[in-house]
Image: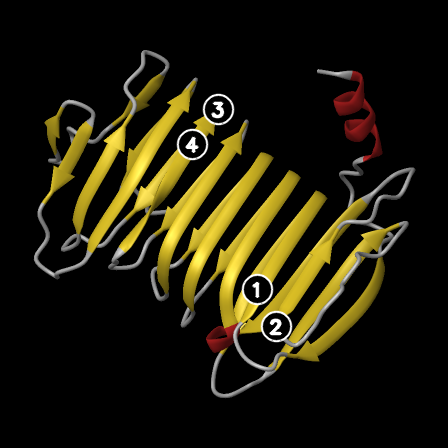
């Protein structure tokens, strides 16, 4: 690892004991963009339904609290640029109907995004050394882009339509999709990237893997990996 990476690893505290706490909250004027920037720790994003217009953030942290700039149409939750031992643990609840876009950047940690009831225009995730779980099985997403280095991403997708990309370097991608949804996956084949698409009954034409659906929904993804794997509908789910 680089000197910068070693320095970050030394600052990243594994223990959750002795953390300070803080609560933030507010309301949106309508649909909003959510940005999450985590360095060392965990994020749990959930949705609220039933007309609740307020968002809430429960934060636990070591040393400095997160930066939380917010407006009527945006919410940013960012790890501080502090020195010394750092850790952030966030529980963020956002009204489902207000989520327009989600942008996630995370380094060293665990992230869960439960988007139940939301209609998301775009979700972008760029993660390093992170265990990421996205549950969009009860949501709608127009576009999804995930780039991962040295981690694990478990993604449950809705019925579509959906398009996007998945990229993994030294990691594992696990993808769960409804059985009646059509799939069009363009997979860049290389020796260090394995998958089970043939075992799942998809048809191959060059780099394209596909199956027809019966629901009318279609999921289209460009997928590539290096020293990585893709598992479609793993045993036990995502």
In the image, which is nearer the foreground, mark 2 or mark 3? 2
The image quadrant of residue 55 is bottom right
In this figure, which residue is indicated by the disc labeled 1?
Answer: 33
In this figure, which residue is indicated by the disc labeled 3?
Answer: 169
Q: CA distance from mark 4 to mark 2?
A: 29 Å
View extreme (top): residue: 191
Between discs 2 and 1, the one toward the N terminus? 1
Q: Residue at coordinates 76% horizontally, 62% vertically from top-left?
A: 59
SS for dot 3 = strand
Q: CA distance from mark 2 to mark 1?
A: 6 Å
Q: Residue at coordinates 31% horizontally, 21% vertically from top-left?
A: 194
Q: CA distance from mark 3 to mark 4?
A: 7 Å
Rendering coords of residue 133 (x, y %): 48, 48
Q: CA distance from mark 2 to mark 3?
A: 34 Å
In this figure, which residue is indicated by the disc labeled 2?
Answer: 73
* Near-viewer residue (135 or 169): 169
Q: Sort mark 1 into few (<14), some (14-19) or many (20+) by Cα contacts within 10 Å.
A: many
- Asked if residue 195 can be seen in this view, the reply is yes
The image quadrant of residue 28 is bottom right
* Near-viewer residue (211 or 129): 211
Q: Residue at coordinates 16% horizontally, 30% vertically from top-left?
A: 199
Q: Sort mark 2 into few (<14), some (14-19) or many (20+) by Cα contacts within 10 Å.
A: some
Task: Confirm or deny contact between disc 2 and disc 1 (CB under 8 A).
Answer: yes
Q: CA distance from mark 1 to mark 3?
A: 28 Å
Taking 142 as reference, is 49 left or right? Answer: right
Q: Sort mark 4 into few (<14), some (14-19) or many (20+) by Cα contacts within 10 Å.
A: many
Disc on res. 167? 4
SS for dot 1 = strand
Tell me: residue 78, above or below residue 126.
Answer: below
């Amino acid at each position: 690892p680089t000197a910068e990476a070693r320095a970050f690893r030394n600052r990243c505290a594994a223990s959750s004991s002795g953390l300070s706490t803080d609560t933030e909250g507010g309301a949106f004027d309508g649909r909003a963009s959510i940005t999450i920037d985590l360095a060392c720790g965990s994020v749990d994003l959930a949705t609220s339904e039933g007309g609740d217009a307020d968002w809430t953030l429960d934060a636990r942290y070591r040393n400095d609290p997160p930066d939380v700039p917010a407006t009527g149409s945006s919410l940013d939750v960012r790890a501080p640029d502090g020195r010394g031992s750092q850790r952030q643990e966030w529980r963020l609840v956002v009204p489902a109907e207000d989520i327009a876009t989600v942008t996630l950047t995370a380094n060293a940690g665990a992230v869960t995004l439960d988007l139940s009831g939301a209609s998301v225009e775009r979700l972008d995730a760029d993660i390093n050394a992170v265990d990421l779980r996205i549950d969009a099985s009860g949501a709608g997403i127009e576009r999804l882009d995930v780039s991962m280095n040295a981690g694990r991403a478990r993604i449950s997708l809705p019925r579509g339509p959906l398009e996007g990309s998945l990229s993994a370097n030294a990691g594992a991608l696990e993808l769960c999709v409804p059985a009646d949804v059509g799939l069009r996956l363009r997979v860049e084949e290389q020796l260090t990237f394995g998958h089970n698409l043939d075992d799942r009954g998809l048809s191959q034409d060059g780099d394209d893997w596909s199956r027809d659906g019966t629901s009318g929904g279609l999921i289209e993804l460009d997928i590539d990996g290096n020293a990585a794997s893709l598992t479609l509908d793993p045993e036990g789910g995502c």
